[in-house]
Image (cartoon, helix red, strand yellow):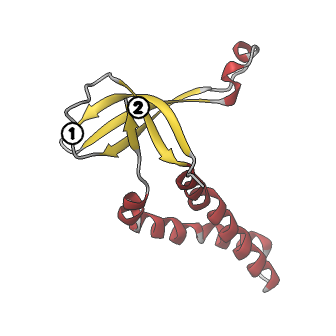
Amino acid sequence: MKEQIVTHPGFVKTIERNRVEIAIMSVAGCASCQLKGACSVSDVEEKQVWVKMDDTSQYRIGQQVTIEMKQSLGTWAVLLGYVFPFLVLLLVLILCISLGFDQGLSGLFALGMLVPYYTVLYLMRHWLDSRFHYSLRN
């Protein structure tokens, strides 16, 4: 079975020797709604992504490109950033309450356990960076 690829249009913002910074315009789902003028939700956000490559000579600042990533990597990003921390929070909260701690103290302790979780993610950033690959298509 072929791996699903997720694509986003963007433009080249910065070019360095072995990497290119791409600006992606992230549009919320309500951007196409006919009532968007009446809504106060911010629907457009610019995000920057660095793409490592051997040869950057074919790209120019402002050039339109399409950035690609395997869908499974996006799933892992959501798991690492949202699902696993939620599970840590929930499990520590349940454990502390079942051990008889006060609910407020249990909540604070559960929130405090997110600090080591995100610290470990931060310390693993170079390893994670080597696993999450973006590529460009003209």
Q: Distance between the residues labelled 1 and 2?
A: 15 Å
Quarter of the image that includes the N terminus: bottom right
For this view, does 12 lie left or right of residue 115?
left
**Which mark is on residue 23?**
2
Q: Residue 27's x, y, as percent?
A: 59, 28
Could you tell me which quadrant the C terminus lies in? top left
Query: Three-letter amino acid code at disc 2?
Result: Ala
Label ID, residue 116: none
Provide residue 115's location: percent of width, then percent of height.
Answer: 53, 67
For residue 48, side relative to residue 108 (left or right)? left
Disc 2 element? strand
Observer-nearest of 27 and 42: 27
Question: Amino acid type of disc 1?
Answer: Glu
Q: Earlier in the sequence, mark 1 or mark 2?
A: 1
- Residue 47 drawn above or below residue 129: above
Q: Residue drawn 69% across and 68% down?
A: 87
Q: Is residue 34 left or right of residue 71?
A: right
From the viewer's side, name the closer residue of 112 and 78: 78
Q: Position of residue 60 (x, y in %)?
A: 25, 25
